[in-house]
Amino acid sequence: MHGAYRDALFSGVPLYTTRLVRERTFTFPTRDQVRSPADAAAVLAEYFSDRDREEFVVAFLDTASTLTGLHVASVGGLAASIVEPRQVFKAAVLANAAAVLLAHNHPSGNPEPSREDVAVTRQLVEAGKVMGIPVHDHLIRATRYR
């Protein structure tokens, strides 16, 4: 479909382009493979160390489980952040992630997952299965148990 025919057919239809833009670089203590929850916690502890509001982040992993990037999917208030699967996996697809690691903080210091945390995790695990991007874990960073 070329030229005038295509232009007439799609007249008035917007054409979109999607790009992944690196905002900044964050220095992690290691770029080794993330093979366990302890490895993941060590990688993300520094990121969450000074956050005063709840943030939900997605860590991108390659096929060797090496951290390749981080995406802040949601910034909330003191007690909650809203996470949408489409935002989590849109970023993962654009980053060409083989898998993701989910994490959020609880500024209250309470390490226990809320009912909402459990429900969101289940939803994201299912979405990851459909997308072919497995969710390796979902960590909660809480100051009470550093």
Image (tube, rainbow, N blue to C red):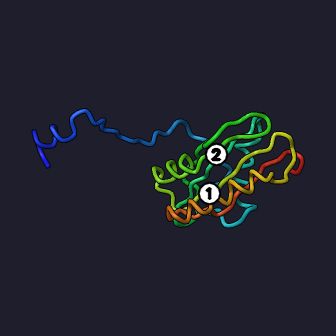
**Amino acid type indicated by mark 2:** Val
User: Between residues 40 and 93, which one lies in front from this camera angle?
Assistant: 93
Mark 2 lies on a secondary structure that is loop
The crowd level at tag 1 (other Cα within 10 Å; few <14, some 14-19, many 20+) is many
Q: Nearer the viewer, residue 92 or 45?
A: 92
Expressed as whole percent of the image width and height from the top left, the position of residue 36 reads 71, 66
Residue type, numbered disc 1: Leu
For residue 146, side relative to residue 4 (left or right): right
User: Where in the figure is residue 114, as x and y percent of width and height?
Assistant: 80, 51
Residue at point 76% right, 45% down? 105
Q: Are marks 2 and 1 in contact (CB under 8 Å)?
A: yes
Q: Secondary structure at mark 1?
A: helix
Estimate the spatial distance between the alpha carbons at disc 2 and disc 1, rounded to whole Å.
Answer: 9 Å
- In the rendered view, tell whether residue 87 sits above or below residue 64: above
- Quickly name the residue at label 2: 83
Indicate whether 82 appears above or below 29.
Answer: above
Q: Position of residue 134 (x, y in %)?
A: 57, 64
Disc with the residue nearer the chain's start (2 vs 1): 2
Horizontally, residue 144 falls left or right of residue 80, namely: right
- Relative to residue 96, is residue 132 depicted above or below? below
Instruction: Kindly identify which numbered label has been placed on residue 124.
Output: 1
| Residue located at (68% from left, 53% from top) | 120
- Farthest residue, direction left: 4
Q: Residue 41: image x %, image y %?
A: 74, 55
Q: Foreground residue, 102 or 128?
A: 128
Q: In which quarter of the view is residue 74 placed?
A: top right
